[in-house]
Amino acid sequence: MTQQHPMNRTPDAGTDSAPTANTAPLTALIVGASGFNGRALARRLTAGGHRVRGLVRNTATAPIGLDEVVRGDAVTGEGLQRALTGVDVAYYFVHSLDPGPGSTDERDVRAAHTFAATAAAEGVPRVVYLTTLAPPAGQAAPAYQHNRLSVEHIFRERIEGAVVLRCPMVLGSGSRALRPYVRLVHRLPVIPLGPWRHNRIAVVDAHTVAECLLAAATADATGSWDVPASAQPTHQQLVEQIADALGLRRTTLPLPVSNATIEARLIAAITGESYNFSRIFVTTNKFDYTVDPARRVPFPNIIPQSGAAAVSAAVLNWTDSPRYRN
């Protein structure tokens, strides 16, 4: 028997037309459950009484508490049919951090096409894709973001029930995007920053992201929306906020020019991140990445934590073992 998905039920009289969250228990699949956002969402879904299935390449890295773990690979299609069978919503957190320079990474594209075809064949009523904010209008996206925008296009073209959430940088303990900032503050008493220090970056607390993901599962409409921001500081302001939260005395050293290759190698050496990831970090910081108010998610009851509180909560509970230098 085909089970009616909560998002297809007739809304109660008197409710507005904006998408709203439904509290009926769901069977949810998280593709990429072992990552930061996948783990956070799994905890939120489990706490809400939903059944959670995870698709991971290595079952040893799957988060504790999943109701079911499926070993698979979105690129090859291994395990996808089994994982997608009978789910109400599938969350997709797969992306490559090693794209080819100036071009869409083929692994991302193959994975998106494979996943979209399997989800359609299994009749999955809702797919939610978490991605990054888009670059400003008129600016060409760096390679990494070009990948993410390509996947968004594939899902919206091929999956009828697709919802795309473009998300600010997530503030949380262990967040991969936040980690370079935290490690720079931990390890350098004087932090050199190029001209991109003046560019703004939207940030949001992890709880807000999880609530938006949950609401998107049963929204009455589909679309591509921006997750609201906790704050939109400049990169220099974010570094200073992290230092203040940690009680560390830090000085930022303004640099008049920026070279992506040199900066990426320096950041990789200081933070321990890979060169490819560090280059992504540098190249995506050359624009303002802010939330478009016209694209804000239609979940008015979801209000982000303040930026200062979100930064403090993330860095004071950080999971690294830093080398502090006061």
Image: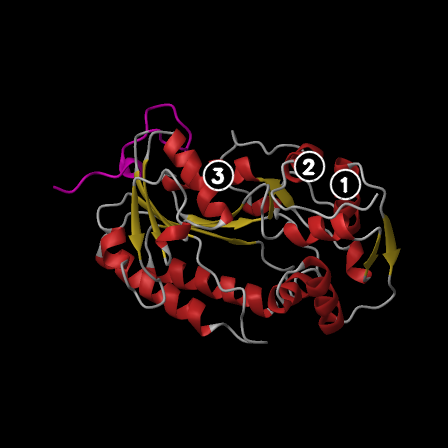
Residue 48 x, y percent position in the rendering: 38, 29
Q: Which amino acid does label 3 sit on?
A: Ala
- In the displayed image of the protein, which residue is found farthest to the left? 1
- First in residue order: circle 1 vs circle 2: 1
- Please rate how many residues cluster around mark 2, counting C-alpha atoms within 10 Å: few if below 14, some from 14 to 19, many from 20: many
The residue pinned by badge 1 equals: 241
Closer to the camera in the image, 15 or 35? 35
The residue pinned by badge 2 equals: 307
State the SS at label 2. Answer: helix
84 relative position to 216: left or right:
left
Instruction: Work out whether 118 lies above or below 226.
Output: below
Whether label 1 touches label 2, CB < 8 Å: yes
Classified by dominant secondary structure, the portion drawn in magenta counts as: loop
The residue pinned by badge 3 equals: 210
Residue at x-position 38% and y-position 65%: 111
Residue 223 x, y percent position in the rendering: 44, 49
161 relative position to 168: left or right:
left
Closer to the camera in the image, 197 or 270? 270
Residue at x-position 38% and y-position 70%: 110
Q: Split into 4 quadrants, where in the image is the C terminus?
A: top right
User: In this orientation, does residue 40 appear?
Assistant: yes
Residue stretch in magenta: 1-23
- First in residue order: circle 1 vs circle 3: 3
Residue at x-position 64% and y-position 34%: 313
Question: Magenta stretch: residue 145 in it?
Answer: no
- Please rate how many residues cluster around mark 3, counting C-alpha atoms within 10 Å: few if below 14, some from 14 to 19, many from 20: many
Colour mapping used in the image:
secondary structure
Q: Which amino acid does label 2 sit on?
A: Gly
State the SS at label 1. Answer: helix
> Which of label 1 and label 2 is nearer to you?
1
User: In this orientation, does residue 235 appear?
Assistant: no
